[in-house]
Image (cartoon, grey):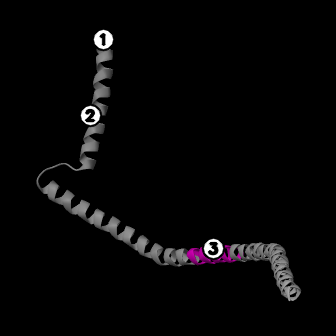
Amino acid sequence: MRTQSKTKKISKVVQANEASRKFVLASLGAVSLVQKQGQKAIDALVAEGEGFQSRTRKFVKTANNDARKFSTSVRKQITSYINPIRSKALKNVETVENVIGERVGAVLGRFGVPSKGDVQELLARVAELNKEIKGGARRAAR
């Protein structure tokens, strides 16, 4: 009886050892698979990231070019619309300035205030008289 009970105990110990051994081997196998599959997964992720980066750069470049073209087109349209308006506005401003200048000059003339042309004419006449006086003074000094 004792031998049978020892045999059963040994059998259970052997079975426990065998289960432990299988568990350890399964764990080692799992670590090995994770290492192999992990590297493959990392390589796949890196390749996908590089492809995504390339696609994104192309998209951004295309979008940037499209935006520049659109901006240039809009700028040309606005310029073609604004330039005639600007020209008309400048002509109108010049006309208004001339009319105001004439009217102010007429009002000042009524009050006896000389115009810019009158003042320039007088300055030219004064300069001419100064030359004559200086010329006469030199002749007299001789």
Q: Which residues are magenta?
A: 58-72
Q: CA distance from mark 3 to mark 2?
A: 69 Å
Reading the image, the residue beneath label 2 is 126
Q: Is residue 23 magenta?
A: no
Q: Residue furthest left?
A: 111
Tag 3: amino acid: Asn
Question: Which of the two labelled residues, at mark 2 and mark 1, occupies the earlier sequence position?
Answer: 2
Which circle marks residue 10 in the picture?
A: none
Report crowding for label 1: few under 14, some 14 to 19, many 20 or more residues within 10 A (C-alpha): few
Quadrant where the N terminus is found in the figure: bottom right
Q: Is residue 61 magenta?
A: yes
Which circle marks residue 64 in the picture?
A: 3
Reading the image, the residue beneath label 1 is 141
Q: Are marks 1 and 3 in contact (CB under 8 Å)?
A: no
Tag 1: amino acid: Ala
Image quadrant assignment for residue 65: bottom right
Left or right of 76? Residue 138 is left
Coordinates of residue 122 in the picture (x, y in percent): 25, 40
